[in-house]
Amino acid sequence: MPCLKTKHTAAKSITKGQHALEQSLKLIEFFNNRFIEGVGIRWGIHRKDTGKLIGTCGFNSWNQKMKNAGIGYELSSKHWGYGYATQALHKIIDSAFSDQLPFGELYRVQAETMLGNGASESVLKKLGFKEEGIRRASGYWKNEYHDLKCYGLLKPEFRVS
């Protein structure tokens, strides 16, 4: 059934779009500042065939003194299950462990997943991450605390190929 947009729903859509744009710009500014401060770096994940941006990945925190970093990634849901996240993470972890990034030597990478996110856990395990336990109430969003499963990867455990 066709959907007709009234002036009211069109205005709501524009307002939502503007809000999303403002949120995106704030997030980009946040990532840029973390890079300038030497504590994080983020990349876009693009499809090779179309060049379309389908997600992001990067090191959300990088502790030069402790030689460790926390990694994060997100992918548009219609691109799940094709190996894009695994491929992108492999590339950035390889770059980090090979000292190709501007923040110094790295020995450990840590990642967290929401409990029950089997697909994300699978991505990490394919890269050699080991499950290290549950961090109770260590995430907070949408006015709720969330338990997170912690994974770690040490430089000698990483498979380059």
Image (tube, grey):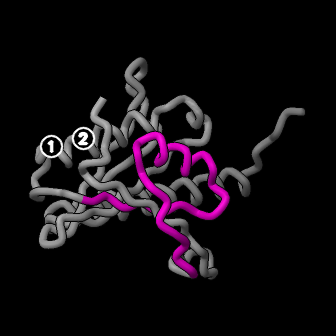
User: Which residue does the image show at 10% across and 53% down from the upper left?
Assistant: 102
Choose between 34 and 20: the one closer to the eye: 34
Judge left or right: residue 53 versus residue 68: right
Residue that badge 1 annotates: 98
Quadrant assignment, res 130: bottom left
Q: Say what amino acid the circle numbered 2 marks.
A: Asp
Image position, residue 132 (x, y; %): 47, 66
Quarter placement of the C terminus = top left
User: Which residue does the image show at 24% across and 41% down from the upper left?
Assistant: 94
Image position, residue 50 (x, y; %): 42, 21
Q: Say what amino acid the circle numbered 1 marks.
A: Ser
Q: Is residue 116 magenta?
A: yes
Quarter placement of the N terminus = top right
Span shown in magenta: 108-136
Judge left or right: residue 155 versus residue 53: left
Residue 75 can be seen in this image: yes
Evaluate if marks 2 and 1 touch, with contact meaning CB atoms under 8 Å apart. yes
User: Which residue does the image show at 56% across and 34% down from the upper left?
Assistant: 79
Choose between 28 and 21: the one closer to the eye: 28
Determine whether the residue tagged by mark 1 lies in a helix, strand or loop: loop
Image position, residue 53 (x, y; %): 42, 36
Residue 33 can be seen in this image: no
Q: Is residue 112 magenta?
A: yes
Quadrant assignment, res 68: bottom left
Judge left or right: residue 72 versus residue 142: left
Mark 1 neighbour class, 10 Å CA radius: few under 14, some 14 to 19, many 20 or more: some
Q: Which mark is residue 94?
A: 2
